[in-house]
């Protein structure tokens, strides 16, 4: 999936990386010394390789969150 932003086309993964950087998630003084940004970036790559579109992406994320929340109780 691609989105148009500021006159250029960027992939979902590129968007995630840009936003993580803007949010300071790669910075040494961020949560877990920047590890969270790297972890989200890795999850984004796996998600992209699986080929999820809008519909399957929402179902996959929702189910993952549900299962994680059940497990972590």
Image (tube, rainbow, N blue to C red):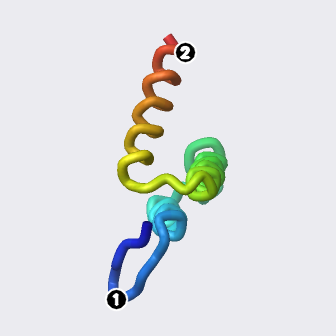
Q: Position of residue 43 (x, y in %)?
A: 60, 48
Q: Position of residue 51 (x, y in %)?
A: 55, 56
Q: Which residue is found at the position 34% from the left and 79% from the top?
A: 5
Q: Is residue 29 visible?
A: no
Q: Nearer the viewer, residue 35 or 27?
A: 35
* C-alpha gap between disc 1 and disc 2: 43 Å
**What element does badge 2 sit on?**
helix
In the figure, 68 relative to 12: above or below? above
Q: Position of residue 26 (x, y in %)?
A: 60, 58
- Residue under circle 2? 71
Please rate how many residues cluster around mark 2, counting C-alpha atoms within 10 Å: few if below 14, some from 14 to 19, many from 20.
few
Q: Which residue is found at the position 47% from the left and 20% from the top?
A: 69
Please rate how many residues cluster around mark 1, counting C-alpha atoms within 10 Å: few if below 14, some from 14 to 19, many from 20.
few
In the figure, 71 relative to 15: above or below? above
Left or right, 19 with respect to 46, comes to: left
Image label count: 2
**What element does badge 1 sit on?**
loop
Label drawn at residue 7: 1
Work out whether mark 1 precedes mark 2 in sequence or the reverse, and give the earlier one.
1
């Amino acid at each position: 999936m691609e989105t148009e932003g500021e006159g250029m086309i960027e992939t979902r993964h590129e968007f995630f990386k840009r936003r993580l950087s803007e949010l300071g998630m790669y910075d040494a003084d961020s949560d877990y010394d920047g590890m969270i940004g790297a972890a989200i970036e890795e999850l984004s790559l796996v998600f992209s390789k699986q080929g999820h579109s809008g519909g399957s992406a929402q179902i996959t994320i929702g189910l993952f969150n549900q299962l994680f929340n059940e497990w972590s109780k």
